[in-house]
Amino acid sequence: MELRVLTGITACAVLLTSCEKDIDVDLPEVPEQFVVEGTIEPGSPPFVILTRTQGWFEPMSPSSLAGIFVGGANVTVDNGDGPIALDHVCTGSLTPEQLVLVSDLTGLDPLLLQVADICVYATANPAVFGEAGRTYQLRVEAENKVLTSTTTIPHPVPLDSVWFKLALVRPDDDSLGFAWCRLTDPDTTGNYYRWMARRVSHRADGSEEDPFYISPFGTTFDDRYLNGLSVDLNTIRGRAPFSDRPEDENEEAGFFKTGDTIAVKFLSIGRAEHDFYRSYEENVSSSGDIFGTPVNARTNINGGLGIWTGRGVYADTIICE
């Protein structure tokens, strides 16, 4: 019997080896494009990051990453009272408090912002700070190219309540759970949402557990199936890109736990912005899946790629007890 099994394994190995074949894939040349990532929230200045597309096989490191950011552009935002130019600000010169603000609005790790000295476009002029219900036109001029986009900040939809609840995935587990919320959707169709959260409780060294807000995959949604209803929704704990923290590698991955304090941002966004984030999530989740269908992230940027999004914000806090 043992001989038969070993013989079978050997035969399978020979068969699989004989099926190996080197395949050369010629990727088509794609023209370089500019990529915009811009946000504006009520009471906050607009933030715009301008980068250029990078080849699939080009190396990724803090130095090479910094090289894709585009400086020297002319960036303006117009809320109907005339265009206001944004300043070109490099993050290496910002204070820790300012880095946290930029991180919150851009989703970039403060450490990356500091190490890579990434340049963003923003302004301290309150005349163009965000207001719910107002429309903002973005114009970017760089290297003889013009990119434009328009977004509106929706009025936020408040959550009825937020709380922490044990997941009870494993017997006698009295610490790990999910964040929950109750949403009463307005009785008009066409509401689009995105959940963001960060743990603001502190580690033993005094640092915050999450340096910026994270949107887990699947937390961008619309009211197609819940229009006018009150529903309870739950979400996992999101993971920061490239995180190697212990809680992202062990049994705590995806869970909040007792003792955490969670700052929540529940965003109301427009349809085009919703379509971008949903298609972006589908694009990332299908990467490396040879059976998946490639999905290009949709964009609301004319003349380039990316997103310019107005975000209506409802903020709340969860104490995990």
Image (spheres, rainbow, N blue to C red):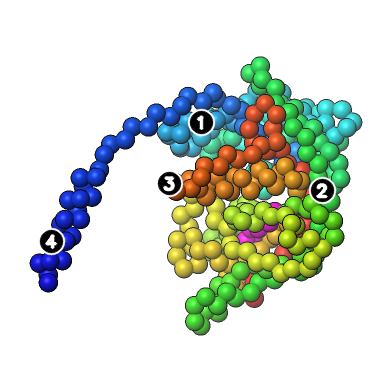
Q: Quadrant of residue 129?
A: top right
Q: Give amino acid for label 2.
A: Pro
Which residue, given by chain and number where applicable, does mark 4 sit on?
7
Label 1: how many Cα within 10 Å (few below 14, some 14–19, many 20+): some
Q: Main secondary structure of the magenta part?
A: strand
Residues at circles 4 and 2 in contact by the CB criterion of under 8 Å: no
Q: Earlier in the sequence, mark 3 or mark 4?
A: 4
C-alpha span from label 1 to label 2 = 33 Å
Q: Give amino acid for label 1.
A: Gln
- Residue 154 in sight: yes
Q: Earlier in the sequence, mark 1 or mark 3?
A: 1
Q: Farthest residue toward the left?
A: 3
Label 3: how many Cα within 10 Å (few below 14, some 14–19, many 20+): few
Give the label on residue 154, or none: 2
Which residue, given by chain and number where applicable, does mark 3 sit on?
290
> Which quadrant would the N terminus be assigned to in this image?
bottom left
C-alpha span from label 3 to label 2 = 38 Å
- Magenta segment range? 194-202
Q: Earlier in the sequence, mark 1 or mark 2?
A: 1
C-alpha span from label 1 to label 4 = 49 Å
Q: Earlier in the sequence, mark 4 or mark 2?
A: 4
Q: Nearer the viewer, residue 135 or 91?
A: 135
Mark 1, secondary structure of its residue: loop
Mark 2, secondary structure of its residue: loop
C-alpha span from label 1 to label 3 = 22 Å
| Residue 124 x %, y % | 78, 36
